[in-house]
Image: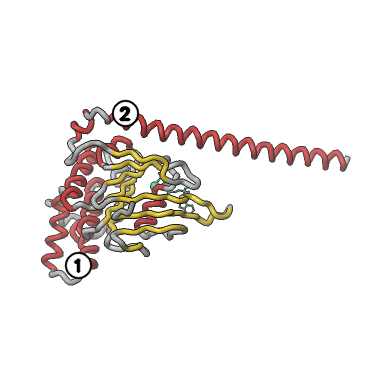
Amino acid sequence: MAGYVEMFNLGKTYDTPNGPAVIVEEFNLNMAKGEYVCLLGHSGCGKSTVLTMVAGLNEITNGGVVVANHEIEGPGPDRGVVFQSPCLMPWMTAMENVMLGVNQVYRHASKNDRRDLAAYYLTLVGLGNSLNVRASDLSQGMQQRVGIARAFALKPNMLLLDEPFGMLDSLTRMELQEILLKILVRDKVTTLMITHDVDEALFMSDRVVMMTNGPRARVGKIFKMPFRRPRVRAEVLEHVAYYALREDMIRFLEEQDHKKLQEDVAKHDATKRDDSQIQVDLDAEVTELV
Ligand SMILES: Nc1ncnc2c1ncn2[C@@H]1O[C@H](COP(=O)(O)OP(=O)(O)OP(=O)(O)O)[C@@H](O)[C@H]1O
Ligand SMILES: [Mg+2]
């Protein structure tokens, strides 16, 4: 099935001091226009690797990514990216930080139009009264809001979010989740978001994609969310399918955990066998010497 976004046979091999490490292999996923997909998986399995490849910030080893019929080659303003910390210019105001991108992408628009656009998205994320506050004087939650406004102001076809609320307290987190959903519903931006939080994935997404444990991580299981939009938190929490879905997701993660543990133990045992063989060889040599 063709999608608005297509990740086909996506693979990443990193060069490491111990040789090439195949982290992601044959990762296949299609997304419809305006769809919201959450990517879940154990720490280190390769989620950020997938996301940064789609962003064009990380070289693709195998396969490719198509967004709106164009195979991506490097980063572009068609894909907005928000990481866990927003990486703002600390000496610039909220407005100036957003204007940095807006000025580049909307070079031909009038200065007033560009300012209006930046101010509009900053207001949507709740920073209407802090446009001229320096980034270094903003709280962590406010900085993350600037990061979100900056991504949206470029009107991307696709939004890529790597644990965007990971460092925020739970109240700010819930507030920003709702703000993000409101803008997304209005702008119909196709979104791929990484999260560690099963409840966040359930609340935000249309589908949750579970990745297998690395190395050679790929799509393990896909869950479709039955909740209607616009999402209302209480409604989602009270939905009959909520807890069954939540349990299935956690079970998947636990199974992956269990598998990884078994593999690690087997690897450890194999190393121990190698060590004992070395000991036997050493003993033989010592006996010969004596
Ligand atoms: N530049 C690199 N060179 C070598 N190995 C790398 C590089 N970047 C990531 N890796 C390795 O690839 C694996 C996947 O990393 P990645 O950051 O994609 O995981 P993740 O699923 O996003 O983890 P987390 O949930 O902790 O953010 C890890 O084992 C990591 O050590
Ligand atoms: Mg990561």
On the rendered image, what quadrant is the C terminus found in? Answer: top right
| Circle 1/circle 2 CB separation < 8 Å | no
Marked residue nearer the N-terminal end (1 or 2): 1
Structure colour scheme: secondary structure
The image position of residue 211, as x and y in percent, is 41, 43
Q: Label 2: few (<14), some or many (≥20) within 10 Å? A: few
Query: What's the residue at 17%, 72% (across, down)?
Result: 108
Q: Nearer the viewer, residue 169 or 41?
A: 41
Q: Which image quadrant is residue 10 in?
A: bottom left
Which residue lies most toward the bottom here?
Answer: 108
Relative to 248, residue 185 above or below: below
Which residue does the image show at 16% across and 54% down from the upper left? 121
Q: State the SS at label 1.
A: loop
Image location (x, y in percent) of residue 73: 37, 64
- Is residue 239 at all visible to an observer of this figure? yes
| Residue at mark 2: C-beta within 8 A of ligand 1 | no
Direction from residue 114 to residue 35 in the image, left or right: right
Q: Image point 18% across, 32% down: which residue?
A: 235
Looking at the rendered structure, which numbered label has been put on residue 244? 2
Q: Which residue is mark 1?
A: 106
Q: Is mark 1 within 8 Å of ligand 2?
A: no
**Amino acid type for the residue under numbered disc 1:** Tyr
- Indicate left or right for 264 with 276 as reference: left
User: x, y (%) of residue 278?
Assistant: 73, 41
Alpha carbon of mark 1 to alpha carbon of mark 2: how far?
A: 46 Å
Q: Which mark is residue 268?
A: none
The residue type indicated by label 2 comes to: Ala
Of circles 1 and 2, the one toward us is 2
| Whole-percent x, y for residue 135 in the image | 23, 54
Task: Please rate how many residues cluster around mark 1, counting C-alpha atoms within 10 Å: few if below 14, some from 14 to 19, many from 20.
Answer: some
Residue extending furthest toward the front: 1
